[in-house]
């Protein structure tokens, strides 16, 4: 019996070898087909290599080079999820810098929790960035869309004095055009301007689609809109400011100053730059600081019908801490990062200027410094006197005005041009003492 089993096994082996023999003889008769065999083998290995490379690029992260971002020198080379996007290989790890070492040195400022990384490019024209509005009472995901191209990271690889974030309404195309054709058209080369615009409310219905189409055209033409997918309304201004500051921290983290303004304002940015060099940078002394018209001793409004209503649940205090009037104010990059690091510990509500430059600024330890720049630099309820402005070194103090100063509302492009011209061409007081007068603002 064992002998028969052995003979059967031996017979099977012979049979299998007999089946394989023709294949061996036909494929690998190297004397006759050696070149063909080598060609097939090399081609096969090359195809396998290309397939592995394709899978690796699609599913794995490629280290992102930061050679064009000198301001991020402290950040390690971390994974960059967007290296497959065209023209986006230089500075895509801005969101991947560990919170222990923010883009600019700020040892005294606690860092925010690390937000989700940007999503992959959905197409060849727009770049999406995802994050979350974080307050103690709010956890609201949002997506920002910006044009894909050279302007996606406008501050990369260069020194930036300031970022101007204009809070704009969806249907305010005339205002945006007025800004572009007046003060927005005279921007120093180290200053960036962006308009921040949210989504339509459900009540807008068919008008929303029309506005979206017009915004798409505007974005394609100018490329200066920051569009996000939360409802854009007056009661949601605190969400809008969060999105704007979050964009600045991720897309322009090396800006020395950050200005918040509205689309019914005028700012002479060349003169603002003069006063930054002459005064504001010296006042800040490297600290987290805000500059503007300080609102002091203001009582929260408890009338439910008011646009500025705040419930005692959201803010139980009797007085707001000192805060900056919201038409136009600016702060150091440190100040923005400092207040944004505290949002998850504070109740969010719609009075955005009191929330960010008052309550959150006070919550930072040590508190963010708030400098009273007063009526000399910012005009809200006072007229511009073109021939009689207070000056220093021959330069008028005034550089910003918002609705209420000398126009009830900006209704046309010409309104913006007229007010900007009045500010830009303002003359100093004739008195010789004006030049040496002590600046107390």
Image (cartoon, helix red, strand yellow):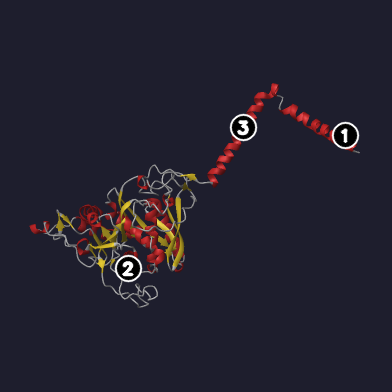
Residue 77: image location, x then y, percent: 44, 45
Tell me the SS state at disc 2: helix
Quadrant showing the C terminus: bottom left
Disc 1 on helix, strand or loop? helix
Lower position in the chain sequence, tag 2 or tag 3: 3
Q: Are marks 2 and 3 in contact (CB under 8 Å)?
A: no
Q: Write down the quadrant of residue 14 in the picture.
A: top right
Real-space Cα distance between discs 3 and 1?
43 Å
Front residue of this view, candidates 222 and 261:
261
Q: Is residue 46 left or right of residue 262?
A: right
Q: Check disc 2: other Cα within 10 Å, few if <14, some if 14-19, many if 20+.
A: many
Question: What percent of the width, then of the height, locates residue 45?
Answer: 61, 34
Q: Is residue 256 above or below residue 302?
A: above
Quarter of the view holding residue 171: bottom left
**Visible in this render: residue 182?**
no
Which disc is residue 43 wearing? 3
Q: Earlier in the sequence, mark 2 or mark 1?
A: 1
Location of residue 17 in the rendering, given as x and y in whole percent from the top left corner? 79, 31
- The residue to which callout 1 is attached is 7
Q: Nearer the viewer, mark 2 or mark 1?
A: 1
- Residue 340 picture location, percent across and down: 37, 60
Tell which of 8 and 370 is nearer to you.
Answer: 8
Q: Closer to the camera: disc 3 or disc 1?
A: 1
Separation (CA) of disc 2 from disc 3 = 68 Å
Outermost residue to the front: 2
Disc 2 designates what residue?
A: 354
Depicted 296 relative to depicted 78: above or below: below
């Amino acid at each position: 019996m064992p002998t028969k089993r052995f003979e059967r096994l031996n017979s099977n082996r012979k049979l299998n070898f007999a089946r394989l023999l023709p294949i061996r003889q036909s494929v690998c008769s190297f004397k006759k087909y050696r070149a063909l065999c080598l060609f097939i083998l090399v081609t096969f290995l090359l195809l396998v290599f290309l397939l592995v490379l394709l899978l690796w690029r699609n599913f794995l992260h490629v280290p992102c080079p930061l050679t064009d971002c000198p301001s991020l020198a402290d950040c390690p080379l971390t994974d960059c999820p967007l290296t497959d996007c065209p023209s986006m290989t230089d500075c895509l790890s801005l969101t991947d810098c560990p919170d222990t070492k923010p883009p600019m040195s700020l040892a005294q400022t606690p860092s925010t929790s690390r937000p989700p990384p940007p999503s992959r490019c959905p197409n060849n024209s727009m770049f999406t960035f995802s994050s979350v509005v974080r307050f103690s009472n709010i956890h609201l995901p949002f997506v920002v869309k910006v044009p894909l191209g050279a302007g996606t990271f406008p501050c990369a690889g260069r020194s930036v004095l300031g970022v101007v974030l204009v809070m704009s309404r969806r249907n305010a195309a005339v205002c945006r055009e007025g800004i572009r054709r007046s003060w927005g058209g005279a921007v120093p080369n180290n200053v960036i301007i962006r308009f921040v615009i949210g989504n339509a409310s459900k009540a807008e219905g068919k008008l929303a689609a029309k506005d979206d189409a017009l915004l798409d055209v505007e974005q394609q033409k100018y490329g200066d809109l920051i569009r996000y997918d939360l409802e854009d309304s007056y009661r949601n201004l605190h969400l809008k400011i969060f999105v704007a500051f979050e964009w600045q921290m991720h897309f322009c983290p090396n800006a020395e100053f950050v200005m918040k303004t509205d689309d019914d304002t005028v700012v002479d940015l060349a003169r603002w730059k003069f006063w930054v060099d002459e005064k504001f940078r010296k006042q800040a002394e490297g600290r987290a600081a805000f500059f503007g018209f300080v609102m002091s001793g203001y009582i929260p409004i408890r009338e439910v019908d008011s646009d500025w209503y705040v419930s005692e649940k959201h803010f139980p205090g009797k007085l707001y801490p000192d805060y900056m009037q919201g038409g136009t104010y600016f702060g150091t990059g440190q100040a923005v990062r400092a207040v944004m690091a505290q949002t998850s510990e504070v109740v969010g509500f719609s009075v955005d200027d009191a929330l960010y430059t008052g309550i959150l600024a006070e919550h930072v330890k040590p508190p963010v410094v708030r400098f009273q720049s007063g009526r000399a630099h910012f005009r809200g309820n006072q007229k511009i006197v073109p021939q009689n402005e207070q000056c220093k070194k021959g330069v008028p103090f005034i550089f910003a005005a918002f609705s209420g100063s000398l126009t009830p509302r900006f209704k046309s492009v010409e309104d913006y041009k007229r007010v900007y011209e009045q500010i830009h061409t303002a003359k100093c007081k004739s008195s010789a003492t004006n030049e040496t007068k002590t600046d107390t603002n």
